[in-house]
Amino acid sequence: MRSSEDKQENLKKSIEIVGEAAGKGADLACFPEFQMAFSSTNQSAMQLASIAETIRGNFISKLAVAAKKNKIGVVGTIYEKSGRPQRVHDTAVMISPAGKVSSVYRKLHLYDALGFKESEKLVPGKTIVKPERTNAGSVGLLICYDLRFPELSRILTVKGADVLVAPSAWVAGEMKEEHWQTMVKARAIENGSYVVAPDQVGNIYCGRSMVVDPFGVVLADMGQREGVEVVEIDKSRVQQVRKSLPLLKSRRTDVYRLSY
């Protein structure tokens, strides 16, 4: 998806995408980070905060109506009011096919790197949210820059996730596409989990929305294309890979230490 700076335009597009995904037989529609709106570098923190909403606000409420109407789960993202006047949460929300909000995750790791400083506009979350059972599997949520921190994906997997969904807005730049592909594949391989990584395309982002299976096989790579692609999640594949490559069982938690 390519989000514009107009959140109503993005909401309208999102609702159409939910309908299209359901029409293609999908159980879960996953949107990228910053679905609500593109925040340009010249947009102030106060301007961004002015468009932020609560979880019960119009953006999520309308997505929930679309989810219920189409009988499909949705992973959407918003700028969420944080209680601080010039800072917002970067939040992923899981909505059930019944139109109920079942999980809310606030991005833990802010992208203060490679010339960017998200902390000037955003405030980080404080909680890892337990995986949520869906028709597509047990889904653990993380967001974009979180992919660079393997601890989060591993904790979600140990807590039961077999699908990691990572809504992203991966900024383009030197080696960035290579980093993106490597991180998405690595999180899948090391955890024996599917990774679903919808990414923003256009503006300053690199696109390349991907789905990778538990053995590192790329099932989808949308390149610079905006739109919907449906991928089948085979739950038996997770069991098969984790049995033949027992990385989770082979962990030496008896000797792992942060200091010696």
Image: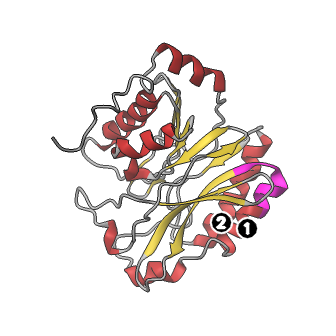
> 123 above or below 165?
below
Residue 63 falls inside the magenta stretch: no
Q: Give the residue type at disc 1.
A: Lys
Which residue occupies the foreground of this view, 250 or 55? 250
Q: Is the Cβ of the residue at disc 2 closer than 8 Å to that at disc 1?
A: yes
Q: Which mark is residue 62?
A: 1
Q: Name which residue lies at 34% across and 46% down.
A: 149
Span of residues in magenta: 65-73
Residue of label 2 = 11
Residue 67 placement (x, y as % from top left): 76, 55
Q: Farthest residue toward the right?
A: 69
Q: Name which residue lies at 57% across and 17% down.
A: 240
Q: Name which residue lies at 36% across and 53% down.
A: 171
Residue 81 placement (x, y as % from top left): 52, 77
Quarter-of-image position of residue 189:
top left
The prevailing secondary structure element of the residues shown in magenta is helix
Residue 71 falls inside the magenta stretch: yes
Q: Nearer the viewer, mark 2 or mark 1?
A: 1
Q: Farthest residue toward the left?
A: 260
Q: Residues within 10 Å of mark 1 (few under 14, many from 20)?
A: some
Residue 246 placement (x, y as % from top left): 45, 19
Which residue occupies the foreground of this view, 140 or 233? 140
Q: Name which residue lies at 52% across and 16% down.
A: 243
- Relative to 113, 63 lies left or right: right
Residue 96 placement (x, y as % from top left): 73, 53
Figure colour scheme:
secondary structure
